[in-house]
């Protein structure tokens, strides 16, 4: 992908630029597909479990609350939050890792990375204007999507990206808040979904100091563990509130002290969060039931990639046209990444005669 003009003047729009960015993201096809993309549990598991869409909405809500309290731009944070997962493949992180593996094994050294793919979706792959590609988002929103997680400079990024976005510099405070809001959202809702599914319970998570602290807050309300649904609801609420208020308090101090990376938590809480993440990886993300579903998704990604690389005429018109300007590897990867879970499974089954 070569650098092209990316910003086009808009006249007579009643919205502020970041609200316009948000609206364009919400109305994109890629955003709607998030409803059927896996967060942790496959969409088919049940109506309650989070998907990439509900996760993005939760991240947006948390990010807006934090930016509002700090006097920052809520619409910018909201736009970045709603777009941050647009580049995710079907089947969660396993799908992205598998697609990256397929590309690298095939000699395509740039591989696949979902943050950069999200940037490519909004700046290139969404086609809403005759004159140019992408959604015509502002620089700050594009930068926030591209620099979703630190470090920003990665070996596979083309040089023109660094020239335009200076990957040595941090993005806006709003973008850094979205990164931490993402973390808050997925920790809280993965615990909620994991317990609701019966794959884990609170007793298994008591190794975490943070879990113990939040559980004590719920019990202080007089809520008994036998009240499963209410206990889960109040636990998630207390966990999010604890992390949000802790982040706000720490960030205010950091801003007052002129820190160039002010968004975060005190060192002790950062350590507790890291330990909780490791515990969730061990107890939930590596649970046999989850691994089984993700293994099936991994095989689907491999099958789709191999089949489409052999026969590109199976690509839809939009993607087949891209073969004129981009490599076959990248076009095939773009198509697979765009799929919802159910589209990927049905396409894979039809491709290999399982109809």
Image (cartoon, rainbow, N blue to C red):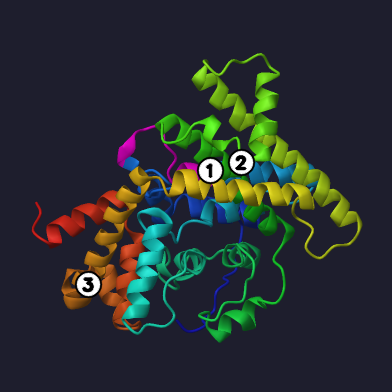
Q: Is residue 116 above or below residue 296?
A: below
Q: Residue 61 got which mark?
A: 2
Relative to residue 68, is residue 294 drawn left or right? left
Residue 119 shows in this picture: yes
In this rendering, position of residue 38 left or right of residue 150: left
Residue 16, percent from left and from top: 66, 53
Q: Magenta part of the protein: which range?
A: 44-56
Q: Which mark is residue 306?
A: 3
Decide if residue 104 is on the left or right side of residue 247: left
Residue 14 visible, this angle? no
Q: Which residue is found at the position 65% from the left and 76% from the top?
A: 167
Residue 198 part of the magenta segment = no
The quadrant in which residue 316 appears is bottom left
Determine the residue positioned at 64% across, 76% down. 165
In the rendered image, which residue does mark 1 sit on?
A: 57
For image coordinates 56% across by 22% down, the residue present is: 231
In this view of the protein, which residue sits in the foreground, 42 or 115? 42
Q: Please report whichever mark, 3 or 2, sits nearer to the chain's N-terminal start.
A: 2
């Amino acid at each position: 992908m070569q650098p092209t003009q990316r910003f086009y003047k808009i006249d007579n729009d009643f919205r502020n630029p970041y609200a316009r960015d948000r609206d364009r993201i919400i109305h994109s096809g890629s955003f709607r597909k998030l409803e059927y993309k896996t967060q942790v549990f496959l969409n088919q598991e049940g109506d309650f479990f989070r998907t990439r869409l509900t996760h993005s909405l939760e991240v947006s809500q948390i990010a807006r609350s934090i930016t509002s309290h700090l006097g920052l731009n809520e619409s910018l944070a909201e736009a970045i939050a709603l777009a941050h997962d647009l580049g995710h493949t079907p089947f969660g992180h396993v799908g992205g890792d598998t697609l990256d593996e397929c590309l690298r094994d095939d000699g395509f050294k740039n591989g696949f990375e979902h943050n950069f793919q999200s940037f490519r979706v909004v700046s290139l792959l969404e086609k809403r204007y005759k004159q140019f590609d992408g959604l015509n988002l502002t620089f700050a929103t594009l930068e926030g999507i591209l620099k979703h997680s630190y470090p920003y400079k990665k070996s596979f990024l083309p040089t023109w990206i660094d020239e335009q976005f200076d990957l040595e510099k941090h993005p806006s405070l709003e973008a850094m808040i979205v990164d931490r809001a993402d973390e808050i959202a997925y920790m809280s809702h993965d615990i909620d979904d994991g317990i609701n599914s019966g794959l884990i319970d609170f007793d298994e998570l008591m190794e975490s100091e943070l879990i113990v602290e939040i559980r004590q807050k719920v019990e202080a309300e007089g809520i008994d563990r036998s009240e499963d649904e209410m206990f889960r609801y109040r636990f998630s609420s207390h966990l999010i509130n604890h992390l949000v208020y802790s982040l706000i308090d720490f960030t205010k101090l950091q801003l007052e002290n002129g820190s160039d990376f002010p968004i975060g938590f005190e060192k002790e809480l950062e350590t507790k969060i890291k330990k909780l993440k490791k515990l969730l990886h061990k107890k939930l993300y590596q649970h046999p039931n989850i691994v089984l579903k993700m293994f099936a998704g991994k095989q689907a990604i491999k099958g789709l990639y191999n089949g489409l690389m052999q026969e590109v005429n199976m690509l839809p018109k939009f993607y087949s046209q891209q073969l004129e300007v981009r490599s076959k590897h990248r076009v095939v990867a773009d198509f697979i990444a765009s799929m919802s879970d159910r589209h990927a499974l049905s396409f894979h089954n039809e491709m290999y005669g399982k109809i």
